[in-house]
Amino acid sequence: MIRLLMWGLLIYIGYRVVVALTKGKKTEIKTSGKRDAAATHRDPVCGVYVSEEDAVVGRLEGERHYFCSMNCLEKFREQLDHKPS
């Protein structure tokens, strides 16, 4: 009886390992497609690339600019204020 339980346990563990390995490959394919689909923009101040979801958006003459943080947005505004007209 104990041998039967041991064999059942080993078969169950083997099954779970196989399922885990096959699921891991499928999720890698799905997530790689999502990463490519996300639009990224370069911060004009520090040069970091940010996704549209995480970016701080500023507008200048109707054009959108994407920043990694409020600090970069403020630096951008200061640069515009100090430009000669």
Image (spheres, helix red, strand yellow):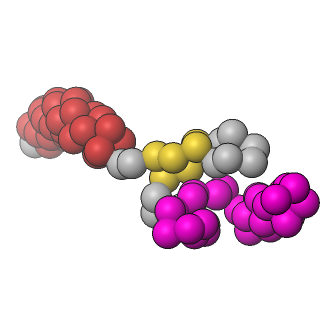
Relative to 51, 84 lies left or right = right
Q: Looking at the image, which residue is at 66% across and 56% down?
A: 68
Image spot of residue 40 (x, y percent) = 46, 46
Q: Is residue 74 magenta?
A: yes
Is residue 24 at all visible to an observer of this figure? no
Residue 8 falls in which quadrant of the image?
Answer: top left
Give the total number of marks visible in the rendering: 0
Residue at the spot x=82%, y=59% of the render?
A: 85
In the image shown, does 8 or 21 lie closer to the viewer? 21
Give how far across and how far down residue 39 sits, in percent: 39, 48
Q: Is residue 18 magenta?
A: no
Q: Is residue 82 above or below residue 31?
A: below
On screen, residue 12 versus residue 33, left or right, reads left
Q: In which quadrant is the N terminus drawn?
A: top left
Tell me if residue 5 comes above or below residue 84 in the rendering: above
Image spot of residue 41 (x, y percent):
51, 47
> Where does the image place residue 44, in percent across and percent down from the top left?
67, 47
Q: In this view, which residue lies farthest toward the front?
A: 85
Q: Quadrant of residue 55?
A: bottom right
* Residue at left offset 25%, top offset 38%: 33
Residue occupying the point 36% across, 48% down: 38
Splitting the image into 4 quarters, where does residue 31 fall? top left
> Which range of residues does the magenta coloring cover?
58-85
